[in-house]
Image: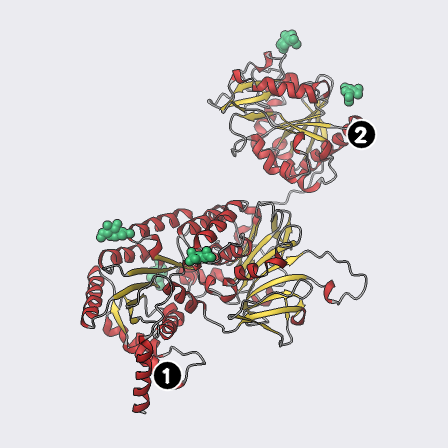
Amino acid sequence: MFVTVFLLLVALCSQMGNGDGGEGAQRPGHVSVIIVGGTGDLAKKYLWQGFFELYVNRVSGGNTFSFYGGGLSPAEKATPVLFEILKAVSCSKDVSPERCALLKEQFLRLSQYRQLKTQEDYQDLAKHIKKQLQEEGMTEAGRLFYLSVPAFTYADIAEKINSSCRSANGAWLKVVLEKPFGHDFRSAQVLASQLGSSLKDEEMYRIDHYLGKQVVSNILPFRIKNRKFLDPIWNKHHIERVEIVLKETLDVKGRIPFYDQYGVIRDVMQNHMTEVMMMLTIKPPMNVSSREEVLQNKLQIFSSLLPLGKNQAVIGQYRAYKTEVQQELNKTKDHVSLTPTFAAVLAHIDEARYEGVPILLISGKMLDERVGYARVLFKSDIFCLQNHNSVHCKPKQIVFYFGHGSLKDPAILVSKNLFKPAVTENEWKEVTEHPDVSVLGLPISDYYVQTPIEQREAYAELISHIFAGRKNNFISTENLLASWALWTPLLSSLASSFPRIYPGGADNGGLLDILLKGKDISYNSRAVIISPDQMGGSSTNGFQVMQGKFRSADMVSAWAEELVERLAADMQEAAEAAVREEGVFHLALSGGSTPLALFHRLSQHHFSFPWRRTHVWMVDERCVPLTELESNFRSLHDHLLQHVRIPYYNIHPMPVQLNQRLCVEEDGGALMYERELGKSVNDTSFHFVMLGVGYDGHTASLFPGGKANELNESLVVLTESPVKPHQRMSLTFGAINRARRVALLVMGKGKHELITQLSRVKDNPDKWPITAVKPVKGRLVWYIDYDALIG
Ligand SMILES: *[C@@H]1O[C@H](CO)[C@@H](O)[C@H](O)[C@H]1NC(C)=O
Ligand SMILES: *[C@@H]1O[C@H](CO)[C@@H](O)[C@H](O)[C@H]1NC(C)=O
Ligand SMILES: *[C@@H]1O[C@H](CO)[C@@H](O)[C@H](O)[C@H]1NC(C)=O
Ligand SMILES: *[C@@H]1O[C@H](CO)[C@@H](O)[C@H](O)[C@H]1NC(C)=O
Ligand SMILES: *[C@@H]1O[C@H](CO)[C@@H](O)[C@H](O)[C@H]1NC(C)=O
């Protein structure tokens, strides 16, 4: 026995001589690996195993190693704990038991525990390493710190490493960090800048362990390898939708103090799922190993993602969570946590290639099964008259299956009616023998299936990337901040939303089913289990649409939703009549927030609106570039024009910016708009003008005390809001009163006071500009919702 071990040792040592030098510009030499938090859960479950594999694979690579488990406990206490963990590491199947025993013994001998609490502890560690190098006559290759500790300690540890533990004479330093990297954009930025003062960017390795999963890291290589099949179909014409799903069956009991501050969006969406979305949507890089190119392509997608608002997410919380929070956070019975344990989010990428393609991200705790996958579902373009079971009649999809669920193993599946994919040699293989299971609605025999030849744990994979300095599998600061910039506004808008309560497991039934409506997402079922805290408010469905008179003009009144529906219908009727009689419809729209509901209604419901024959004009405009959020035109574009099929040349924004300046009288912008109007609009008489009214009684941008009333000869003027320096361009009463139809939309409780006043005052354009709206030949109709009318 002794003899065998001896011989093996000799064999091993002779192997060490002919090293391959490793990848990159790494010089062979001694490597010190320090796991800070070396006796913690993650270290126990994955990290030591990963470093053992690194050691096994690298003993022939010319490097020598020392391993340190660091922690706050004193060495007497923690050393036995560490060795229990180390003894549990295992070898891969192709290593003989004898060799495995030997490797483990060496690994144990190279490892030790060190208390790492104070600055002195880090200095002592540095001295220890230096002494060891001298004694054994070794040169140092580098030091790898793995911080497996709570994120709030990162900055402090990084600082200690920088001040006491940097290696001298050109050896590398690598510091590995795990999420959470901040709590929102601001805190991520603060953490990044703190770390940046101690570590260089290239020294930091931010781990997202999803990027170490074999299926996730193979998404891009798969897309590139199968380019000739995918290029023609990886776009809006063919992709029905993209789904990224992580379902878990476990709860978060025991982790509440952490989890309650984060919730599912921060826990998995901002990081893992966002990275998967990137891999699926970025432009395939020319060079997959080029970190810079991959990063640029990601930032491109980040900048094209439409903002996520309240309507792009639904959230839920499993029922027992509330009690768990009360217990673990020591709260009273009336404490309510709004932290979501389930979320579904709908993203859209505003690029020609993906326009309108829904990207759905779903994850939650306490669901019916444990599974993770990304599916690209393609549109069905085949109509099967008969034989619906033949392959070509079935759904077409590509599934990147991360693991668990019915299939258990990681795999990439391609419907047989799509194409036969190429396989990444050396690492992946096609499999044809399958258990009798279905994956996402298709029996496995309907797929081409490929799996990794050898399954590797994500951490082991990432540890080998870190060692080799392959940085493209890690999250750069820019990448991180771009992701937070996407998620932070959504998180703030959901901060006071009540999650839907779900019972957990199979009992969830259809409660968490999702409905996609255009760019919005909602729960499919309306049956909400409301917690008592949410009660209050009353249903208001009593009234229907009411007709009457207001200021001796016609009035339509209803609850907001019906009112908007009615106005949209009236507008469409006017449009159809105009197109019938004159072949064209001239519509002037005002800005502000009141018409947004109308724009939404028009874009989502009125598909037969004659947009191709409609010209859209502006009632008024702020003197800001049209690209600014405050621009009325920008708002009109974002909420209506981009969603409907209106020809560009039918759109008439006001020329507020001329000669690189805004609204200067002598640039003649107002006159220019008036001429344009004169050329296009018969008798300068709009078919339909939609107006709102401000709290001070202004309409369009015609303010109390303004001179606009005198300018009845011009149609367009520059005006000034009483709240200077807000300049505007506006149609005049002259232009408005020539219209065939004028609609005045007033909505919301806040306008009740105004409506009450207006019902009493006489015409007084100087004080109440709105009272000057009196179409000469046309018809004025007030659309006032019940909130504004009744209060
Ligand atoms: C590290 O510490 C030194 C001083 O000890 C300081 O000059 C340097 O800026 C710090 N940061 C980095 C990234 O080296
Ligand atoms: C791809 O990028 C890697 C990393 O930047 C680089 O080492 C390699 O030479 C590049 N390959 C090609 C073909 O440009
Ligand atoms: C829980 O809170 C109560 C009242 O604040 C306190 O007396 C008690 O010690 C706390 N218990 C724990 C376990 O923190
Ligand atoms: C212009 O409008 C008048 C009614 O105001 C109408 O009689 C005439 O046909 C219109 N002209 C054109 C060219 O549509
Ligand atoms: C312009 O309006 C004023 C006041 O409303 C009126 O007295 C005047 O006659 C109008 N001028 C023209 C040309 O319509």
Q: Is residue 174 above or below residue 682?
A: below
In-front residue for pair 373/290: 290
178 vs 6, left or right, is right
Mark earlier in primary sequence (1, 2): 1
Mark 1 surroundings: few (<14), some (14-19) or many (≥20) residues within 10 A: some
Q: Residue 248 in the image: state x and y as whole percent.
A: 52, 65
Q: Residue at x 74, y 28 (%)?
A: 584
Q: Is residue 205 above or below residue 644?
A: below
Q: Residue 43 in the image: state x and y as whole percent.
A: 36, 69
Where residue 51 sits, quadrant-wise, is bottom left
131 vs 564, left or right, is left
Amino acid type for the residue under numbered disc 1 = Arg
Q: Residue 705 in the image: state x and y as whole percent.
A: 53, 15
Q: Which residue is mark 1?
A: 99
| Count of residue discs | 2
Q: Tell me the quadrant of ligand 5.
A: top right
Q: Residue at x 45, y 65 (%)?
A: 253
Circle on res. 580:
2
In-front residue for pair 478/133: 133
